[in-house]
Amino acid sequence: MHTLREALAAAAEQKIALGHFNISDSTQLHAIVDVAQELELPVVLGVSEGERTFLGVPEVAALVASERAQGKAVYLNADHTHSVEGCKEAIDAGFDSVIIDCTKLTEDERIAQTREVVAYANASGRDVMIEGELGYIGTSSKLLDSIPEDVLAAALPSADDAQRFVEETGVTALAPAVGNVHGMLKNQPNPRLHIDLIAEIRAALPHTPLVLHGGSGIEDEDFTGAIKAGMNLVHINTEIRVAYRKGIEAGLAADADEIAPYRYLDHGRDQMKEVVRKRLALFAGKAA
Ligand code: 13P
């Protein structure tokens, strides 16, 4: 099987993006993996620190290893990891990539911590990608009434900033802020992306995989533009959280006496599959 780096390079060559979906449990994992298999696409599963604590680091690594043993191209990412120790734990557990999230630290701290994680990954003997973030897009995969003030106030990085950051830290993937926001507005699409900025960053970093976080709520047209301009991987979380919850609520409402989790969770799984199918197909330029 290809490494994640190879899978992203292949996607870049085909001018498509891969999907990254967060999971909190095995129901979500199966929903995402089933759809990726159906569409014959590799897929990345992400676990934030909270999701990881709930699922268990060795447990989620074992679940993904079991999918891979069945020949499925499924990759595992340690999403938004705020400590060097957390990154090292994920690398030791066999994750394919780690995001060191130092967006709240000073520039010097950010560079020092990112370098430490890159060095640890390089010494692991495996091909582990280390992703850095530049700019600030908020923190939570939740429903939003409005765009958070601190996101509005944060400056977007320039292509020069992006190039310097990659050179100084040695990260092997970059998630730049390009108008994207974590979370999804309740009553309207999320803000438009700066497609020109993505193209400038791509031109400055022709070989670095670029990752679009905060995918929920972005309009299809912006996704297509962002992928054409150079994004290689798109993160979606809030949309599948919403679908999962709505599906479970419908499952419970359909039979007030139902107590078998696999029966009411199944409704949540079906609704998540719809979202994943629509997004993966769009990112890969396929019919859903
Ligand atoms: P959304 O919840 O906005 O889709 O963002 C997900 C994400 O970027 C996780 O890293």
Image (cartoon, grey):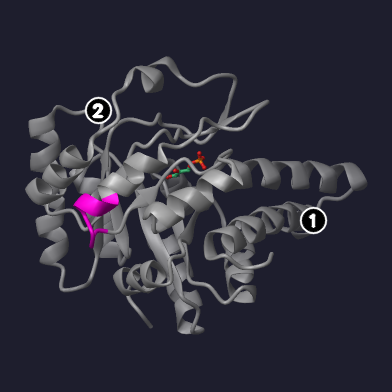
Residue 142, given in percent of the width and then of the height, sits at 55, 32
Crowding near pointer 1: few (<14 within 10 Å), some, many (20+)? few
Is 284 part of what is drawn in magenta? no
Is 204 part of what is drawn in magenta? yes
In the drawing, does residue 202 fall left or right of residue 49?
Answer: left
User: Disc 2 vs disc 1: which is toward the camera?
Assistant: 2
Q: Which residues are magenta?
A: 202-208
Residue 53, given in percent of the width and then of the height, sits at 42, 46
Observer-nearest of 249 and 279: 279
Observer-nearest of 288 and 33: 288
In the drawing, does residue 195 fall left or right of residue 118?
Answer: right
Residue 2, given in percent of the width and then of the height, sits at 35, 79
Which image quarter holds the C terminus? bottom right
Mark carried by residue 104: 2
Q: Is residue 56 visible?
A: no
Q: Which residue type does callout 2 highlight?
A: Lys
Residue 98, given in percent of the width and then of the height, sits at 29, 54
Q: Which residue type does callout 1 highlight?
A: Ala
Which image quarter holds the N terminus? bottom left
Q: Residue at x 19, y 28 (%)?
A: 105
Crowding near pointer 2: few (<14 within 10 Å), some, many (20+)? few
Q: Residue at x 57, y 61 (%)?
A: 280
Observer-nearest of 59 and 267: 267
Secondary structure of residue under mark 2: loop
Query: Is the CB of mark 1 within 8 Å of ligand 1?
Result: no
Secondary structure of residue under mark 1: loop
Question: Alpha carbon of mark 2 to alpha carbon of mark 1: how far?
Answer: 43 Å
Q: Quadrant of residue 269?
A: bottom right
Name the residue that disc number 1 marks: 260
Sequence-earlier tag: 2 or 1: 2
